[in-house]
Amino acid sequence: MRSRSPRAVLTNLFLFLACPAFATESLSTRVEVGLGFHYSRGHYGTSQVTEIDYVPLTARLDVNQWSAKLTLPYLHISGNNSVVEGPNGPLALSGGSADGLGDLLVAGTYTFFPFAYWAPFIEFGPLLKIPTADPDKGLGTGAPDVTTEAVAARTYDRLTPFAGLGYRYVGNAPTTRLHDGFLASGGALYRLVDHVDAGCFVSWRQTATPTTGDVLDVVPFATVRITPHWLVDSYVTAGLASGSPDVGTGVQVRYRYDSDP
């Protein structure tokens, strides 16, 4: 069996939904695909309201301590002409409404086993944002971003606290110079009953723009394992800082296949 632990928010709101199980020392393989929907609304540090619909298609492969994940989203955005922090990084909005493919996210991680019985698992790796979105439509910046982050987690019976710390290197938007910055998250996952987990985490990111504030969100979430292969994740978000959306909500359905020796 694998001990369960959630991945922190990394650079966007959806990566926590994977809630992956950290590997044990026996070789095992897991393949997972998912489809989600996210809606957020707020001022994002600007004078006008921006609304974002985000539909990510995900594919993930875990082989023992190694993990790789791809996320390709579809976006619909309505807002003013500004740069705001979207689900997958800064968005250089062109004003009005636009929709289309978003930026491709490619993530890879390696899990370090505890060096002592009291120590946490530590997961470390990069996240690359490949600029596949159309910057002329305001669906991206047209530049790549790279994030590195370490996430530590330790399970105590039904409770799994976790915390993450990382740094994001941000490419510049066509008309705005963006800034690199730190990101951090922390929270806990609790096994309510068999096949049902719930928890909450707080996610913070330094602002990438000179005109908006930092992003600080609180995110209660739940994961239900309907069958051995099908899982459903749901969450809500509340913004606690000027660069955050005021509110958000989302759901994701995942299919998982495990191949154990």
Image (cartoon, rainbow, N blue to C red):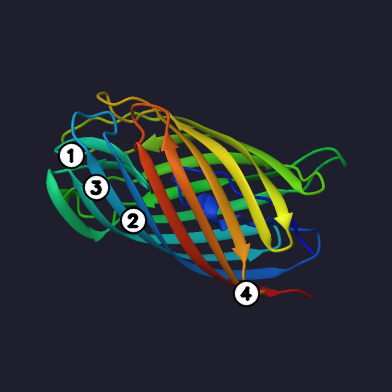
The N terminus, quarter of image? bottom right
Q: CA distance from mark 3 to mark 1?
A: 7 Å
| Residue 42, horizontal then vertical, whole percent | 29, 38
Q: Which residue is labeled 2 in the image?
A: 54
| Residue 26, horizontal then vertical, whole percent | 81, 64
Answer above or below: position of 87 versus 246.
below
Label 2 close to label 3 by CB (< 8 Å)? no
Which residue is at the front of the view, 240 or 23? 240
Q: Which residue is labeled 3 in the image?
A: 142
**Along the polypeptide, which appears first: circle 1 or circle 2?**
2
For the point 71% across and 53% down, the residue is 192
Which is more foreground, mark 4 or mark 3? 4
For the point 20% across and 54% down, the residue is 134
Label 2 close to label 4 by CB (< 8 Å)? no
So how many labels did they put on this image? 4
**Along the polypeptide, which appears first: circle 3 or circle 1?**
3
Q: Amino acid at mark 2?
A: Tyr
The C terminus, quarter of image? bottom right
Which is more foreground, mark 1 or mark 2? 2
Q: Amino acid at mark 3?
A: Gly
